[in-house]
Image (spheres, coloured by chain):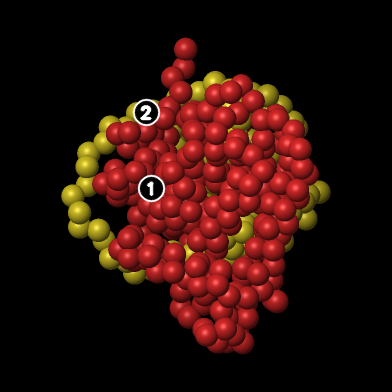
Chain colours: A red, B yellow
Amino acid sequence: MIKKTKIIMGMPVTLMTPTELESEAAFHNTFSFFEQVDRLYSPYIDTSDVSRINRREINESDYSLEMYEILELATKTKTETNGYFDVWHDGIFDPSGIVKGWAIQRAANIMRHYSDDFYVEAGGDIQVQGENDHNAPWRIGVRNPFDRNQNVSVVSLDNHAIATSGTAIKGQHIYNPVTSEPPTDIVSLSVIAPKIIDADRMATAAFAMGSRGIGFIENLAGYEAFMIDTNKRVTATSGWKNFEVQEK
Amino acid sequence: MILAFVAYSIQQRNEGNQAMNRVVSSASPTASTDNLDSPSPANTATPTTYKNGTYTGKSADAFYGFIQVKATISGGKLTNIEFLDYPQDQPNSVTINQQAMPVLKSQAIQVQSAQVDGVSGATDTNHAFTESLGDALAQAHV
């Protein structure tokens, strides 16, 4: 397996292919793309388009095509999730919740030019295609949020994506005295979908719904989910087991 | 969950388990401890003592936002953690989906040992928390 990791956008970005590719351009161009995404869409970089939009320095008519694509996805997701997903809060524009999945999707499109088999990951969200170095579907673990060295489910993915949402600190009343947000009772929620752009935005929205999120995904065709709650119990949608690798 | 975070970050730093228990009892009086794992037996480091006071950790990037904590030390132990900054990317008012919720079975976590190519998990915030708390504790170190 050929594997390279770089820290971009404050998180590890990993690319894998089962065998060495003829061209070094695949990894180089894909990493460069992620770096460009950080420069343009990070709300923490003053010169990014996102920061400039927040300072009202760019008019909507001057947005890039990519920015339109991201905004369109954000609007679509807001409708599909009954308002649980919104890139605007109190007049501040922060599309981070869309950008991560969108960037992995675009990166996968770059990798596809060079290889039929690949793995693209940014901060625990993964898109795979084809096979791993054992000529088998890619095997992805779902991390135990109570012990990051353990997996609590292992899935076998071929042309699918998995995204996990779980900002576990948020919503806890003792840590969150300034908002009226109710405490969340779930620790992490993972979503499998054919495309990472969809898995990522639905994982974010379903996590925001708390324990109702797993039911939301169950009702959504083409998606499966795996939830871990504060009592260290897991709940999966009915089709999750079709992806799961059974222990011998 | 909070306990797990605190336990995790303290184990990360090889600090004593007394500190963890102290945080548990003072910071979260309503939390149940029934589901907590025992502290790792491998963690036999001498309990660290801290200077009393409050220490603000550096702001750590969690990609979706920044995490910054303030640690309070009294009686030489970590007694409280306050969040000065944390990501707030969820809307406060939401429309609840009235669609019928299916009933799904739940079970206790089971650790899987199958070999994997990669791992999916939401660790960004967790790491940022650990980083900021670690920084605050380093300042408190005797």
From the top left corner, tell me how far across and down residue A240 is, in percent. Answer: 37, 33
- Which residue corresponds to the image point at 71% horizontal and 46% vertical from the top-left? A26
Is residue B63 left or right of B55 when viewed as pictured? left
Quadrant for the N terminus of chain A, please: top right
Viewer-side residue, B74 vs B4: B4
**How far apart are the two marked residues, 2 and 1, measured between alpha carbons?**
26 Å
**What residue would you read off at disc 2?**
A242
Residue at numbered disc 1 = A185
Q: What amino acid is at disc 1?
A: Asp
Say whether residue B133 is visible. Answer: no
Residue B47: image quadrant is top right
Q: Position of residue A218 (x, y in %)?
A: 29, 43
Instruction: Point out residue A213 in the picture as x, y percentages from the top left corner.
Output: 34, 49
Q: Residue at x 49, y 33 (%)?
A: A157
* Most distant residue in the top direction: A248
Q: Residue at x 29, y 34 (%)?
A: A238
Name the kind of residue labelled 2 in the image.
Answer: Asn
Is the residue A131 above or below the residue A247 in the image?
Answer: below
Label 2: few (<14), some (14–19) or many (≥20) C-alpha neighbours in 10 Å:
few
Per the image, label 1 sits on a secondary structure element best described as loop
Q: Are marks 2 and 1 in contact (CB under 8 Å)?
A: no
Q: Chain of mark 1?
A: A
